[in-house]
Image (spheres, coloured by chain):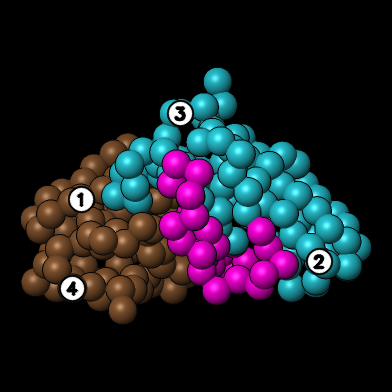
Chain colours: A brown, B cyan
Amino acid sequence: GDSVTQMEGPVTLSEEAFLTINCTYTATGYPSLFWYVQYPGEGLQLLLKATKADDKGSNKGFEATYRKETTSFHLEKGSVQVSDSAVYFCALYQTGANNLFFGTGTRLTVIP
Amino acid sequence: DTAVSQTPKYLVTQMGNDKSIKCEQNLGHDTMYWYKQDSKKFLKIMFSYNNKELIINETVPNRFSPKSPDKAHLNLHINSLELGDSAVYFCASSEGGATRTQYFGPGTRLLVL
């Protein structure tokens, strides 16, 4: 069945470091891919998405490229800030399904 | 204006009690969801409603019963609460199905003693 695998956390970085959070997926066809972010004490909110192969989603300095050949959607940011500390979820939507499949989440902590 | 709201924000109760969590969205969306997030942050879909009709009912105990009185509301009633029900419950909504952006509520933190 459809699934999403994220890198295990937690991830701790210094401010201005480069961030990569890996996400790979298993699905038939051409799913849509998402990154959601959950700040402490809050619900999830959409960070970015890509709906077809080679699309790049971007928002708030974060980017992720839909790579069908490697079934990946890795999240990157060139220079993280303390305010980026949160839990990041990769998610997949498959045509015909009625829901998103979420990864297990990766906790990021950015220290000054 | 709050897009997706849940009440209560915190809920502490004894085993065996019955409790309800309410959810309302003012976005005009057709589809609403309930998720359960455990202590390790794992997020699992429980129910999904589209235009007041149940379209997803994952394997959850039948002690959990969703009720959608109208498109803007999806409430979750839980009977005979158990320790394992302790978690954060999130309501969400989307327009036209799951491929669209889902908007999440702030969560209800349930602790069963």
Q: In the image, residue A95 lies at what x, y percent?
A: 23, 60
**Marks 1 and 3 close (CB-CB < 8 Å):** no
- Kind of residue indicated by mark 3: Leu
Disc 2 element:
loop
Left/right placement of residue A74 relative to residue B60 reads: left
Magenta part of the protein: which range?
B37-65
Q: Confirm whether circles 1 and 3 share one chain.
A: no
The mark closer to the camera, 1 or 3, is 3
- Kind of residue indicated by mark 2: Leu
Q: Depth check: A53 or B51 in front?
A: B51
Of callouts 2 and 3, the N-terminal one: 3
Crowd rating for badge 1 (residues with CA inside 10 Å; few <14, some 14–19, many 20+): many
**Marks 1 and 4 close (CB-CB < 8 Å):** no
Residue A28: mark: 4
State the separation of the CA atoms marked 2 and 3. 31 Å
Would you say residue B90 is visible in this rendering? Answer: yes
- Residue displayed at 12% across by 54% down: A52
**Marks 2 and 1 close (CB-CB < 8 Å):** no
- Residue displayed at 44% across by 28% down: B28
Disc 1 element:
strand
